[in-house]
Image: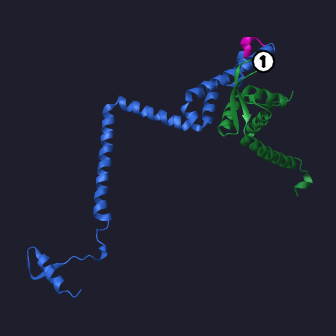
Amino acid sequence: MSWWHRLLRRNLMEERLDKELVFHLEQHTSELIAREHDPVEARRLARISLGGPEQVKEKCRDARGTRWAEDLAQDFRYALRTLRQRPGFATVALLTLALGTGATTVMFTVINGVLLKPLPFSDPGRLVLVQEQTDTSTIFGNLWAFAYPNYLDCKRESPL
Amino acid sequence: MATKSDLPQGTLDLLILKVVALGPVHGYAIAQRLQQVSNDVVQVPQGSLYPALHRLENRNLLAADWKETETGREAKFYRLTKKGRAQLETETASWDRLTQAVGLILRMSEGGAK
């Protein structure tokens, strides 16, 4: 039986485990009775030599190798149940998560667009900012935006 | 009668593999056989027998089928897989080596320690 089988057919596994241990106890008991033990006493002795049935079963379940998945599912169900019992807490927790995720996504999107992605030109390292400088300053300073016609003039007179 | 000894750790698996190698058996018969063959010297911890069987089955060293016993009851019969047989051989060999070495050390004479 594969790991998946053992996990999904849990009830069958439990049933078989129980059957196996019951078989063991009954065999041992009947053998003790055959050796002239009192039936009640025989049953008691058989139980003692096997040990606590739940402890043995627990160890067998551990040996099955599906324990972590079963425990995970159980924890998950428990979490859902608890959340359903306290809708207020659940709402707050959910909102906190939603807002947190949302804000982080927005921040990343902005930073990615503005800082991380290169500019959509073939050689962004060679981009220059051109400004005009006047001799006199106003309250805005003496650096001015470069007018488009001026750019056209420069382009026409440039040797390149 | 000699006092019963506990099994050294890790030997239960080896003993189970050996018993199962002789033919398909159910858990109770394994416990019985171990007790009988060892002349009641080895205390087979029945509580650890089933977890060990399930562990070995899980590791594909043993396989199990539900079959009827001679008394007509359904029981889980274990048998050795190919992998289990190989494991039994390697573990038997390493057990032999270990016990020989321990025996040599224990029988070391006074002069031999020089």
Magenta segment main secondary structure: helix
Q: Where does residue A136 sit, x and y in percent of width and height?
A: 8, 82
Residue at mark 1: chain: A
- In the image, taking residue A101 as reference, residue A158 lies left or right, namely left
Q: Which residue is mark 1?
A: A31
* Residue at 45% over, 35% down: A76
The one of A23 and A133 positioned closer to us in this rendering: A23
Q: Residue at x 67, y 24 (%)?
A: A21
Residue A8 in which image quadrant: top right
Callout 1, which amino acid? Glu
Please identify the quadrant where the C terminus of chain A is shown: bottom left
Task: Give the drawing colour for chain B.
Answer: green
Residue A39 in magenta stretch: yes
In the orientation shown, which residue stands out farthest toward the bottom?
A159
Which residue is rendered at x = 16% and y = 84% of the image? A156
Q: Is residue A66 above or below residue B94?
A: above
Considering only vertical position in the picture, is A20 above or below B106? above
Marks counted in the figure total: 1
What residue span does the magenta drawing correspond to? A37-42
Q: Which one is nearer the viewer's eye here, A9 or A90?
A: A9
User: Horizontal and vertical percent for residue A68?
Assistant: 54, 38
What chain is colored blue?
A
SS assignment at label 1:
helix
Q: Looking at the image, can residue A147 be seen?
A: no
Please identify the quarter of the rendering in which residue A155 is found: bottom left
Tag 1: Cα neighbours inside 10 Å, few (<14), some, or many (≥20)? some
